[in-house]
């Protein structure tokens, strides 16, 4: 019997997940469907319950329902607990298992696809929202020399560091201290409104990789600035998108699909993912 999966969110018009999971299923020979379910505000819990009643096996969850989904889950992986949010659910014997694959997807894109190990490197994460929070645990587990957080609202970054303090060393820095990092990751949503987070001139000194979590936008102001400062490697979040989906697919089906072809196909703008 064909198994049913879905992505829940609102809006979902832009979602690439159905395409990605259809490709994964074809490659791995898995008999499944994957649909978009755009739940209304206040309607997520009901829509999820209906999907489970109808025999759904699992789902992805995107904005604005990642926190609510976390609350509805009966069991949580460590990555999901640390993030306080979930993007992947699996339904099993009346239970709802929550995973968070965003951070591991980002890490895998950087380490495996872009070939830059986090271990022993100095990493600067810009932003302290859901995406940054999800990335902290896998990044700490990869043992960077330093993991620093810089956010427009300092108190939010401080709270995030406080929450993560049992998992490793992560600290908040002031803009003036943003220099000498090997990897600078833009986990803010500034690019979605065509902005660049406020950054000092020094931020890209010695930087080997500037990574933008937003995707499908070509060279964002953050990536343009990194390019103009001579950063040797640029990437947007399309690799993270495909890798988090591959990890979710494995969480559901126990098989890991390949990702390289899809990342290439979904990359918008030839300058976005490149070595200079
Ligand atoms: P949140 O809304 O949870 O957090 C937004 C963060 O961005 C906050 O830290 C906020 O700072 C900061 N911010 C927003 N605007 C600005 C600005 N103009 N200047 C400086 N800082 C700003 O968003 P998410 O964490 O969910 O998403 C962040 C980004 O990651 C988005 O671009 C999203 O599309 C992308 N993303 C990509 C994924 C992928 O698979 N590639 C997966 C998930 C997210 P403050 O605290 O001061 O408000």
Image (cartoon, helix red, strand yellow):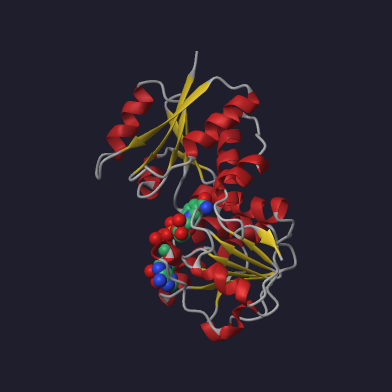
Residue 83 appears anywhere in the view: no
Q: Is residue 45 above or below residue 157?
A: above
Q: Residue most toward the front?
A: 270
Q: Is residue 166 left or right of residue 256?
A: left
Q: Position of residue 243 (x, y in %)?
A: 60, 45
Query: Residue 13: where, in percent of width, then height?
Result: 37, 42
Quadrant containing the C terminus is: bottom right
Locate residue 137, reporting x and y percent: 59, 57
The residue depicted at 54 percent of the width and 83 percent of the height is: 200
Left or right of 117, for residue 48: left
Is 129 or 213 nearer to us in this picture? 213
Q: Residue 48 falls in which quadrant of the image?
A: top left
Tally the marks. Answer: 0
Q: Position of residue 125 (x, y in %)?
A: 56, 68
Write the residue at 35% across / 50% down. 64
Task: Identify the residue at horizontal 55%, vertical 19% (top origin).
Answer: 31
Looking at the image, which residue is at 60% across and 50% down? 239
Does residue 234 sit above or below 199 in this rendering?
above
- Residue 220 can be seen, yes or no: yes
Question: Quadrant of the rendered structure where residue 265 is?
Answer: top right
Residue 205, quarter of picture: bottom right
Q: Above or below — where is 101 with respect to 230?
A: above
Residue 12 appears left or right of 258: left
Residue 146 to residue 52: above or below: below
Q: Nearer the viewer, residue 148 or 70?
A: 148
Furthest-top residue in view? Answer: 1
Ligand 1 is found in which quarter of the picture? bottom left
């Amino acid at each position: 019997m064909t198994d049913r999966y879905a992505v829940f969110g609102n809006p979902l018009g832009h979602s690439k997940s159905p395409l990605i999971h259809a490709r994964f299923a074809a490659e791995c020979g898995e008999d499944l469907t994957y649909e978009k379910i755009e739940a209304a505000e206040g309607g997520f819990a009901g829509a999820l319950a209906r999907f489970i009643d109808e025999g759904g096996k699992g789902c992805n969850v995107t904005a604005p329902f990642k926190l609510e989904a976390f609350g509805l889950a009966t069991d949580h992986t460590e990555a999901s607990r640390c993030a306080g949010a979930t993007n992947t659910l699996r339904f099993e014997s009346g239970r709802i298992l929550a995973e968070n694959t965003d951070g591991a997807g980002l890490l895998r894109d950087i380490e495996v696809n872009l070939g830059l190990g986090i271990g022993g490197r100095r990493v600067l994460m810009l932003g302290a929202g859901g995406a940054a929070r999800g990335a902290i645990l896998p990044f700490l587990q990869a043992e960077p020399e330093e993991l620093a957080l810089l956010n427009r609202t300092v108190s939010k970054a401080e709270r995030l560091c406080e929450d993560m303090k049992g998992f490793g060393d992560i600290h908040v820095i002031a803009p003036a201290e943003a220099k000498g990092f090997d990897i600078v990751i833009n986990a803010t949503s500034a690019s979605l409104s065509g902005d660049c987070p406020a950054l000092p001139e020094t931020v890209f000194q010695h930087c080997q990789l500037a990574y933008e979590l937003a995707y499908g936008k070509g060279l964002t102001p953050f990536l343009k600035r990194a390019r103009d400062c001579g950063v040797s490697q640029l990437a947007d979040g399309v690799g993270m998108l495909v890798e988090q989906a591959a990890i979710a697919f494995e969480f559901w089906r126990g098989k890991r699909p390949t990702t390289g072809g899809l990342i290439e196909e979904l990359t918008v703008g030839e300058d976005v993912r490149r070595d200079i």
